[in-house]
């Protein structure tokens, strides 16, 4: 049985000390006492009422996510599979998108107005959030450098970054992100906040600017008081598009540890990093991250998706922790087996990634800019219908 120790407490980890609000000790693993990170607990899973001082708070206990001290989807099973503790999500990285390149900003014009409007984009994102929550989606991924606004792009001449070249924060982008985090806090949702994206990391002058960007973004979240944020250092750190060495796979654990080293009022942020679709995390990340990301892009069969989850649990340095697929563009939601179901059966969370295909209109996709953030297409409806069936929904109170 786990025992909770109050903060402050210094926990010896593999090669580092970790500070956390509370620590639950359990049986030794490979001769080393295993610890569980638990943030300061609030009283209820339900969203805090307007004006309340309570905040939505995410924590990890073993391989399960908790919100406000209670496991997500508490008590829920689906077709005999445990849902409690999962973090079902979607990739919605363009929540604060803007293009500071005057030569390309015209590409993102709304069909009804003929111009791009970053505030409209964020406003419509926030307006759609309650409907996602009602279908049982408890988390979404956004990114301070967005993602390809075309779905997949070889070249990325647009300038979409919350960081200035020296690593300082871009005020208008961070103000839009503040509004997104506040709404998620209100709704009892978790934000997977990505810092860097290939094709935009070159906006930072050098590795020193990257370090300043990490420090500034992490301090911004902590100082803002948000407790519902998980950090994804970079989207697909092994992608060849990255130019800054410290973000690349061999060294990215340095940035994970840097985020973990920031502490405010006895707490720190939980952090990890993702890899290209179908790739397993490397040992340097497995040993340092608080949870592990997988991507399902390029994973052609559900059987392979399930195998990747099992293989992740066998990696050197793995200890009991959550596994989250937070980017997968395989659907087949009408079939008894698909990548979502495969992850659920292996007790891993799953994330919906949808972009506008060639010839499709404004209502399609969640990544292609401009975005219709509502559940506006057959593909979106199929995902959210299955999600609601699996999770039982999560009505906003």
Image (cartoon, grey):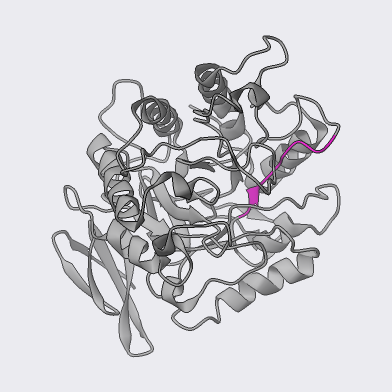
Residue 32 to residue 164: above or below: below
Looking at this view, is 88 or 2 the one in front? 88
The quadrant of the image that shows the N terminus is: bottom left
Residue drawn at point x = 59 percent, y = 72 percent:
280
Instruction: Please indicate, yes or no, whether residue 22 appears anywhere in the rendered image.
Output: yes
Provide the residue span drawn in magenta: 350-358
The x, y position of residue 267, in whole percent, is 23, 52
Residue 227 to residue 347: above or below: above
In the current view of this chain or complex, which residue is farthest to the top? 113
In the current view of this chain or complex, which residue is farthest to the bottom? 31
In the current view of this chain or complex, which residue is farthest to the left? 8
| Count of picture labels | 0
Q: Is residue 344 left or right of residue 172?
A: right
Residue drawn at point x = 35 percent, y = 81 percent:
27
Residue 372 falls in image quadrant: top right
The x, y position of residue 247, in whole percent, is 43, 60
The x, y position of residue 94, in whole percent, is 56, 34
Can residue 161 be found in the magenta stretch? Answer: no
Residue 335 to residue 300: above or below: above
The x, y position of residue 122, in whole percent, is 51, 23
Looking at this view, is 152 or 334 the one in front? 152
Residue drawn at point x = 64 percent, y = 21 percent:
106
Residue 246 falls in image quadrant: bottom left
Residue drawn at point x = 18 percent, y = 53 percent:
266
Residue 153 falls in image quadrant: top right
Looking at this view, is 189 or 254 the one in front? 254
Secondary structure character of the magenta stretch overall: loop
Can residue 353 be found in the magenta stretch? Answer: yes
């Amino acid at each position: 049985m786990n025992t909770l120790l109050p903060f402050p407490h210094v926990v010896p980890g593999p090669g580092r000390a970790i500070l956390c609000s509370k620590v639950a000790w359990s049986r030794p693993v490979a001769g080393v006492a295993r610890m569980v990170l638990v943030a300061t607990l609030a009283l209820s899973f339900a969203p805090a009422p307007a004006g309340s001082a309570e905040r939505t708070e995410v924590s990890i206990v073993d391989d399960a996510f908790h919100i406000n001290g209670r496991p997500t989807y508490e008590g829920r099973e689906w077709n005999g599979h445990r849902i409690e503790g999962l973090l079902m999500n979607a990739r919605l990285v363009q929540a604060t998108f803007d293009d500071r390149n005057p030569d390309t900003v015209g590409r993102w014009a709304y069909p009804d107005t003929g111009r791009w409007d970053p505030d409209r984009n964020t406003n419509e994102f926030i307006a759609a959030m309650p409907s996602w929550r009602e279908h049982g989606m408890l988390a979404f991924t956004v990114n301070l450098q967005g993602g390809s606004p075309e779905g997949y792009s070889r070249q990325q001449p647009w300038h979409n970054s919350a960081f200035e070249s020296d690593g300082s924060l871009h005020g208008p982008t961070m103000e839009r992100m503040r509004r997104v985090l506040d709404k998620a806090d209100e709704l009892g949702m978790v934000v997977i906040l990505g810092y860097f994206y290939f094709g935009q990391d070159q906006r930072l002058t050098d590795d020193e600017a990257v370090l300043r960007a990490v420090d500034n973004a992490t301090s911004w979240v902590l100082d803002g008081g948000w407790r519902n944020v998980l950090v994804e250092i970079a989207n697909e750190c092994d992608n060849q598009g990255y130019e800054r060495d410290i973000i690349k796979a061999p060294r990215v654990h340095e940035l994970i540890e840097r985020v973990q080293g920031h502490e405010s009022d006895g707490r720190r942020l939980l952090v990890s990093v993702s890899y290209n679709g179908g790739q397993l995390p490397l040992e340097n990340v497995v040993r340092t991250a608080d949870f592990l990301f997988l991507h399902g892009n390029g994973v052609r069969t559900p059987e392979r998706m399930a195998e990747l989850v099992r293989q992740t649990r066998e990696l050197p340095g793995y200890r009991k922790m959550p596994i989250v697929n937070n980017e997968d563009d395989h659907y087949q939601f009408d079939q008894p087996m698909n990548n979502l179901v495969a992850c659920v059966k292996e007790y891993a969370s799953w994330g919906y990634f949808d972009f506008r295909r060639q010839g499709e209109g404004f209502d399609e996709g969640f990544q292609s800019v401009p975005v219709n953030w509502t559940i506006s297409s057959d593909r979106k409806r199929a995902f959210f219908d299955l999600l609601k069936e699996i999770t039982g929904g999560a009505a906003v109170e």
